[in-house]
Structure formats: C-alpha cells, structure tokens
Image: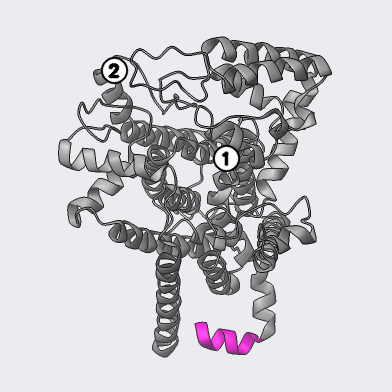
C-alpha cells in the first residue's frame, strides 16, 4: 500500500532541506578555510594542468615535461576535467568537491537504510546517518583542500553501497550488475589513492568469506532472494565479475606505464624520491623501527634533505643502547654537515644531504633493531601506531591543529605558543572521535545481535574495512591520521543504525507522521 501523497511530499521536502544544508555548510568551510594549500597541492595542480594543456602526465613546471608515474592519475584527471569546464579555477575545484562530498553524505544515508533490518527504522536510520556524515568535521575539512581525500572517500562509500545492493539483490542479474559497479568504483578509488584498493580488498574478502566460511548455501538461502537461491557457483561468478570490472577499469594505468617507461608499474612508489632522485630506503626503514606517532613525521620524514635533523629531536625510545645513540649521532652529523664540492662556483654547497653511505648506516641499525626485538617491530609498535592513528584528534589542516599530550604548561599559553580556545577545540575533536567510534561500535553490535545472516555479513564487511586499513597503515614509517578519514562515513552509517531506536522512541507518532 502506497504512502499518502502528503507524507511523501513532506519526506522529500525534509531531504531537500537536509541536502541543501549540508551543501551550504561545505561552502562555509570553503569560504573560511579555503586559503590554505597543502604541500601536495602544487603537484596535483601541475599534473592536472599539464594533462589538459600539454597532453602529458608530468609534474614538472616547465620543459622538458618528462612523464611521471609518481602519482596515480585519478585526482589530476579530476582537476583537468574541472579546468576544462572552467579554466584554472581553485574555486571551481572546491565547489565540485562540495557537491561530491554532499553526495557522499547521501550515499551514507542510503547505506544505513540498506543495513538497517527493521523496516520501520530504515528512514530514521538513513536521516541520522546523513546528519552524522554531514556535520563530521574530519571529512568536512578536506572539502576546501586541493587533495584527493574527498573524492577517494566518495568512491569508498560508493563501492560499499554497490556491494551492499549486490548482497540485497533479488535476482542473479541484479547481483551481477551491482558487483560490476562495485568493481568499477573500487578501481576508480584506487586510481585516486593507492590505499583505496584496501576497501576493494575488504569487499572481496567479505564475498569470499560468504562463499567459504560459515555462510554456505543453507545460510545464504536466508538472504532476501525471491526467485532463486544463491549457490557457491553464483558467488564465484559475482567474484569474477567484480574482479574483471576492477581490472578492466584499472588496466589503462599500468599499460600506459609499460608503454612509456617499459616497466610494469601498477601503483605509485611507496617512497617518493628526494629532489636529487635518491630514495633513502634505509633511513625510512630505521624510522619504521621506532616511529609510533605523527609528531615525528614532519621534522624527520618530510623535512629530510631540506632541514637539519638534531639528535635532541629523536626520543629515547629510538635507541636501545648508548652505542646505538652514538652511531645515529654520527650519521646525523654527516647529514647535517655534508662535504660537497659544487661543480660550479655559482652553485652553493648543500646545507644538508642524505647520501647512500649515510642511508646504508641507518639500514644496518634498522636491521639490528628488528633482529634484537622481533615482537616490538611486528606487534607492539604496530599496535601503538594503530592506537595513535585512530584516537588522534584528526585536526589536520585546522588552524588549531596540534597534539593533546603532553599537557601544556601555563607558560605555553602566556608566551603565545598555544591558545586556550585552540586547546579546547582539540579536546572537543578528541571527544568527537570517541563519539563516532562508540556509535560505530554500537551500530556494528546491533547488526550482529540481529541474528540475521545478511546483517552479520554487513557487520563483517565494516570490521574488515576498518581492520585492513588500520593494519596496513600501522606498518608504515609515516603514520598520519588523515589516512583514516575515509572510515568516518562508515562510522556515520553505523551511528545512524545505533541511534535509530533512540530517536524513534523520543516521539514515535510525530516521527511517523513526518516521514510517512
């Protein structure tokens, strides 16, 4: 039986107001926070302009425009498309990202509606999830930034939404179509950021688990398939279709690299080379043996070959002995005081320089530290990184960005190095992280507690999304919390499911009247 026309109109009007409000909020962020440009922004802009104007994928600002593979092409292609429509306009890029991020919020609402098993609560879960995504400050901040986070978040949510619709499909044809869409969106997300492939891995792992572990034919028949039951063969076809769609969408990038560089390069390199082309893998390997927080990333990682590195910047946990500390001090002294002979009198000597000899010294220390304490490197340190990544304030790119701990003294506020309002904002952001985490956990618990096969599959899918991302980024030498920004829309979807019973209980009659 259809809903009354008045109820449908009221529901559509409510959604229109919510969507317009979310879009306007993003325009407000663009207006007030659109002046700051990240260090990666110039590289993306150069790639986009060279694609559009010079028809070459190059990160150089002038001739010769040598082609590059140091960045996957998704975001530069987006910039080139915006420039094609409205040439060289940062405002146009940001406005497009505002539209895309608003669309992400809509997809989050759809996702919550898919996952909520109680038909009476689907609408309220959808609206609450949309609101949580719309006001989330962790994703909002990247709308004004000329960075790939906003687009990669959209495609991550689109991928999981397509996979959810595929699991809910009433026929095999519908399932195959949605898995093809999932493969395409997964590839597009990977072309925007290489770590976007982790979302596709989580989806595929869920599908394999559905067919192999605990959800066999007898369980799968509980899925809402009216016309036909799902069999292991059909699941295998779904898996094949998703993988084929992913490969066909992603294939032009490695094919281009094979043609241009005569090398099979699927993704961008894990470490970008220094300005002189050298990649100090040994030094990065040494950082991986002790760095457990982003506080050390900028001065020791991104400032390498640009600024001196002082021994006092390195904490005691980076050394296992006085002898090791002395060896690191000697290597840093050679880095801070390079003995260079410039080829021309007009070229000044480098202020700092990482050389292969220094790098090999760090590599040796790193190997000794791993051998000395295997559990520290493979278990305790990744656990610390994962905790720091998740429970960070996620205030990157805000004017008050900083660390909560150690607690600042009164002098830090008096001399102007810290402001009371900024420090209070950090505590508010920390509370919001805990809030979204708690809502996500409650939502996942409600999905599992429902006892329905499909609800538990969705719960496993979200757990795998979070787990794969945390595990991967807890093993790298630059654990930056911004790598987890794409997780918050999924926490918002779970939050909608967690809050739906509470919101409905406040005034069920008024709620049902408003939403039909």
Any part of residue 400 in sight: yes
Which residue in the structure is indicated by mark 2? Answer: 261
SS under mark 1: helix
User: Label 1, on which residue?
Assistant: 206
Q: Position of residue 321 (x, y in %)?
A: 83, 18
Quarter of the image for the N terminus: give it. bottom left
Q: Crowding near pointer 2: few (<14 within 10 Å), some, many (20+)?
A: few
Which is more toward the observer, 135 or 68? 68
Q: Is residue 168 above or below residue 193?
A: below
| 123 sits to left or right of 144 | right
Q: Main secondary structure of the magenta part?
A: helix
In the image, the segment drawn in magenta is 507-516
Could you tell whether 346 is left or right of 316 in the image? left
Question: Is residue 478 something that shows in the picture?
Answer: no
Residue drawn 72% across the image and 32% down it: 312
Q: Nearer the viewer, residue 176 or 228?
A: 176
Residue furthest to the front: 345
């Amino acid at each position: 039986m259809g809903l009354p026309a008045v109820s449908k109109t009221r529901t559509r009007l409510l959604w229109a107001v919510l969507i317009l409000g979310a879009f306007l909020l993003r325009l407000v962020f663009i207006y007030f926070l659109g002046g700051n440009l990240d260090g990666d922004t110039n590289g993306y802009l150069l790639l986009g302009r060279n694609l559009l104007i010079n028809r070459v994928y190059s990160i150089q600002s002038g001739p010769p425009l040598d082609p590059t593979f140091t960045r996957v092409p998704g975001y530069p292609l987006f910039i080139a498309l915006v420039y094609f429509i409205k040439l060289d306009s940062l405002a146009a890029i940001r406005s497009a990202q505002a539209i895309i991020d608003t669309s992400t919020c809509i997809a989050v609402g759809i996702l919550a509606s898919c996952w909520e098993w109680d038909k009476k609560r689907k609408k309220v879960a959808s609206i609450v999830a949309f609101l949580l995504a719309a006001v989330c400050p962790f994703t909002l901040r990247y709308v004004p930034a000329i960075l790939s986070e906003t687009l990669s978040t959209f495609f991550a949510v689109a991928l999981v939404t397509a996979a959810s619709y595929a699991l809910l499909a009433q026929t095999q044809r519908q399932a195959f179509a949605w898995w093809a869409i999932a493969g395409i969106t997964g590839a597009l997300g990977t072309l925007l950021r290489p770590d976007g492939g982790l979302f596709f891995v989580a989806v595929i792992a869920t599908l394999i688990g559905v067919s192999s572990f605990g959800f066999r034919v007898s369980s799968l028949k509980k899925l809402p398939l009216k016309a036909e039951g799902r069999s292991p063969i059909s699941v295998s076809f779904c898996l094949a279709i998703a993988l084929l769609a992913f490969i066909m969408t992603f294939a032009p990038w490695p094919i281009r690299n094979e043609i241009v560089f005569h090398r099979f390069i699927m993704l961008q390199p894990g470490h970008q080379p220094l300005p002189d082309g050298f990649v100090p893998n040994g030094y990065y390997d040494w950082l991986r043996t002790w760095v457990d927080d982003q506080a050390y990333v900028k001065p020791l990682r991104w400032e390498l070959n640009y600024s001196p590195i002082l021994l006092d910047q390195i904490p005691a946990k980076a050394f296992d002995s006085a002898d090791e500390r002395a060896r690191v001090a000697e290597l840093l002294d050679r880095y801070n005081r390079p003995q260079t002979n410039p080829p021309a009198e007009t070229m000044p000597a480098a202020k700092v320089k990482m050389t292969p000899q220094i790098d090999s010294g760090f590599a040796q220390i790193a190997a000794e530290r791993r051998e000395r304490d295997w559990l520290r490197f493979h278990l305790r340190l990744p656990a610390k990184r994962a905790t720091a990544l998740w429970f960070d304030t996620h205030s990157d790119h805000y004017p008050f960005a900083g660390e909560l701990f150690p607690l600042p003294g009164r002098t830090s506020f008096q001399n102007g190095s810290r402001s009371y309002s900024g420090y209070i904002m950090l505590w508010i952001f920390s509370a919001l992280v805990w809030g979204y985490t708690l809502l996500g956990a409650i939502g996942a618990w409600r999905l599992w507690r429902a006892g329905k096969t499909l609800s538990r599959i969705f719960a496993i899918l979200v757990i795998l999304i979070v787990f794969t991302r945390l595990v991967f980024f807890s093993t790298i030498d630059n654990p930056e919390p911004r790598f987890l920004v794409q997780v918050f829309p999924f926490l918002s979807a779970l939050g909608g499911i967690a809050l739906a019973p509470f919101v409905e209980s406040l005034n069920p009659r008024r709620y049902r009247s408003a939403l039909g």
